[in-house]
Each structure stands twice: as C-alpha cells, then as structure tokens.
C-alpha cells in the first residue's frame, strides 16, 4: 500500500526566556541562513517563544537534518512544528490534536504538553495540567507510545483552544518539558547561584559523574559566597576559591577548599586543573579572553563561565566572545567544544562551556 506523504513540519518553534525573543529570533535567522534556508520570524516581545518560517517549505528537511540545538544560545527548546491549530472545540480538543500529531509521526517516545514560561501563561498552565492526563491516556490507548527511538510530541498551548504541535529529537533538544530543569535549591548551599552551575553540569556534560569525580581539582574565580564552590565540593572536587569577599565557613571546614583573597584575573594555578569555573561580574569579552588564556597555557581541561549581558546588543556580544575563542583556539593545539546557552537559571546572562576534547570525544564538535 502506498503511504500518504506526511506534511513536513512547517516552522521551527523555539522557547526562550521572556524578554529575549529578539536575540532568539536573530540567531535562528543566522543559523538557518548558514544552512542555506532563508526565512522570517514571528517574535512577539515578552511572549517567551519565537517561530521561524522558511520561505521555501522544502528547506525544512535540511533544517531538521542539520540545525543543531547546541548551536543555539537563547533557545530553551527546539521543536519542528506544524502551523498553529486554533478553534479547538472545548467539548473535544483531543481528536483534532491527535489528527495533527499523527500527521507528524506514527509513534512517539514521549509527549510534552506545554506553555510559554511567562506570567501570562501561568493561568493557562493550570488548564494544561488538567488536560494532560486524559490526552496522554488516549495516546497510550491508541498505541502511539512505546518506541524510544521515535520523536517526542510537543503540544505548545497558546490558549485553551489554540496550540502548536511539533516534534523534537532526544539528541537535538532539551530533555525537559518547556526546556526547564526543575532543580530544588539545596538548603546547605551558600547562594542561589549554585543552581546555575548545577544546571550547567546537567546541560553541558554527557556524563557528569565521570566528568566531576572525587580527586579532581578546580579553580572557582569570583567564588564568594560559595554557591559554585559548594557544587564542586559536593562532588569531592578539591577547589581553590578565588575572591576578595568572604566564603561560607562550612566550605572551608570541608577540608577541600583553599580560599585565596586575590584578583581572579591575575591568579594562575601552580599545576593544571581539571576544572575552571568563573562567575565574576565583568565584561563578557574580558572573561572570555581569560578563559582563552588559561586554555592556551594548558591550565584547565574544562571551563564553565557566566557572561553578564547588561548591554543592548546581547546576541552580538556573545557572538563576539565566540569569535574570540575561535581566533585564539586555532593556537590551542587541541580540538575543543564550545557551547553558549542561556540557562533557565540565567537572567540577563548566558553560560559558556569550553572543553578540551579527548580523542574519543571528538565526534560531535559544535559550531565553535
Ligand atoms: C555573582 S558573585 C559570585 C557568586 C558565586 N558564584 C556563588 O555561587 O556564590 C560575583 C563574585 O565575583 C567577585 N569578583 C568580581 N571581580 C573579581 C575579581 N577581579 N577577582 C576576584 N573576584 C571577583 C565578587 O567579589 C563576587 O563575590
């Protein structure tokens, strides 16, 4: 029997932090253009999402194949979607949604029912929480689940009667509903900043337990009061915490922390360390240059660094930092991976991850 051709996804749906739609829009236009796909965006200020529509429908196939989530800074999630469905009948929303879903794929590995992460969408999320169980049960009854290789279905509600339906692939998207890792603040941590580093480990590392293990060494630049150092100590990583400010005394009692009251730009370790982390409040380009200096001198294997973006041209500023690493990286003498991402716990900031690649890990090098 001839299969009916499926409609290609028509657009790319990106979730982002409210207020960063302009940045998210500018980068998807650039990344799509890099892949030869011109198009336009819909990006309403403070809506928490952006939609990219290619001029040529056929360009979606290449975008699905080649657009990498890792290459996006401001997107929390990457979904290939159909045009929005609206006017869902309140007495039976499930049937028309399933019609669209099955137009995208026969099977799904999971289903996320979502909204934008904005105050306005909070009320809508109450409806979505109620709607999710019967919808999921119907999908299960129809045998639409069960294939772990299949794409995930996203139903992104705009209102209780309108939604985008789309798919994402496990290896090229955020693993969390709404692209948000729900982390609990650990009471013993000295600052809320601790959640930024915890999220960074989850987002950037493929094997956190192996990549952060007892006996490793780290330097934390701009460490006080110690939320980031706390994450390292928790994993028994011996840490030099550099900051003129005071550190939580409990960290010093762990026996794993040395506190140095000095300028983080001047400090260099006597021996190379496994990890360099940096949360100093400084110009992004200065922080990035410092990371490049450490790598060029072979002083760290991996780095996580926060870039504060109080300026207007935030996307351009991060791209300037990427260009600087690219320029300096040519002289590192080893392959590396560089990713920038605005994490859920980042405000007007992004977090960078720079890591020396071992031979075995060379395969998925992102745009660096
Ligand atoms: C955002 S706070 C760091 C919070 C920390 N990551 C935590 O989780 O608790 C920034 C810190 O950077 C420090 N700082 C700023 N410039 C510095 C410099 N040049 N050298 C060392 N520390 C610096 C400040 O003293 C401040 O404690």
Image (cartoon, rainbow, N blue to C red):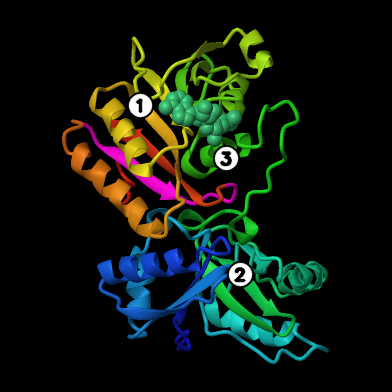
User: Looking at this view, is 356 or 104 the one in front?
Assistant: 356
Discs 1, 3 touching: Cβ within 8 Å: no
* Mark closer to the chain start, 1 or 3: 3
Residue 343 magenta-drawn? yes
Does the Cβ of the disc 3 residue fall within 8 Å of ligand 1? yes
Q: Nearer the viewer, residue 250 or 298?
A: 250
**In front here: 346 or 212?**
346
| Any part of residue 211 in sight | no
- Boundaries of the magenta span: 334-345
Q: Which residue, given by chain and number where applicable, does mark 3 sit on?
A: 196
| Label 1 – label 2 distance at C-alpha | 37 Å
Asked if residue 46 lies left or right of residue 323, the reply is right
Q: Which residue is mark 2?
A: 154
Label at residue 249: none
Which label lies toward us, 1 or 3? 3
Under tag 2, what secondary structure?
Answer: strand
Which residue is the site of mark 1? 301
Position in image of residue 111 (x %, y %): 65, 66
């Amino acid at each position: 029997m001839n299969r009916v051709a499926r409609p290609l996804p028509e657009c790319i749906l990106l979730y982002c932090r409210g207020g960063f739609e302009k940045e998210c829009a500018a980068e998807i236009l650039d990344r799509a253009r890099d892949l030869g796909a011109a198009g336009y965006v819909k990006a309403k200020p403070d809506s928490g999402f952006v939609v990219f529509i290619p001029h040529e429908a056929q360009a979606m196939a290449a975008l699905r194949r080649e657009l990498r989530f890792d290459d996006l800074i401001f997107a929390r999630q990457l979904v290939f979607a159909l045009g929005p469905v609206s006017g869902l009948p309140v007495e039976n929303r499930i049937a028309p949604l399933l019609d669209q879903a099955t137009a995208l794929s026969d099977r799904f590995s999971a289903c996320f029912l979502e909204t934008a992460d904005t105050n306005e969408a909070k009320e809508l999320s109450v409806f979505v929480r109620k709607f999710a169980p019967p919808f999921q049960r119907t999908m299960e009854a129809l045998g639409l689940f069960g294939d772990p290789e299949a794409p995930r279905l996203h139903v992104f509600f705009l209102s209780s009667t309108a939604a985008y339906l789309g798919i994402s692939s496990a290896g090229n998207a955020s693993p969390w509903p709404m692209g948000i890792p729900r982390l609990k603040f650990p009471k013993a941590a000295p600052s809320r900043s601790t959640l930024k580093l915890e999220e960074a480990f989850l987002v950037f590392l493929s094997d956190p337990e192996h990549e952060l293990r007892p006996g490793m060494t780290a330097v934390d630049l701009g460490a006080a009061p110690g939320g980031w150092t706390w994450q390292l100590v928790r994993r028994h990583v011996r840490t030099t915490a550099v900051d003129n400010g005071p550190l939580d005394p409990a960290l010093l009692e762990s026996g794993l922390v040395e506190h140095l009251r000095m300028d983080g730009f001047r400090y260099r370790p006597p021996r190379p360390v496994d990890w360099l982390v940096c949360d100093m409040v400084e110009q992004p380009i200065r922080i990035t240059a410092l990371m490049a200096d450490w790598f060029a001198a072979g002083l760290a294997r991996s780095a996580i660094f926060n870039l504060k973006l109080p300026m207007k041209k935030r996307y351009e500023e991060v791209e300037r930092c990427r260009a600087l690493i690219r320029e300096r990286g040519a002289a590192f003498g080893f392959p590396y991976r560089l990713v920038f991402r605005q994490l859920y716990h980042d405000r007007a900031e992004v977090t960078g991850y720079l890591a020396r690649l071992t031979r075995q890990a060379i395969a998925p090098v992102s745009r660096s």
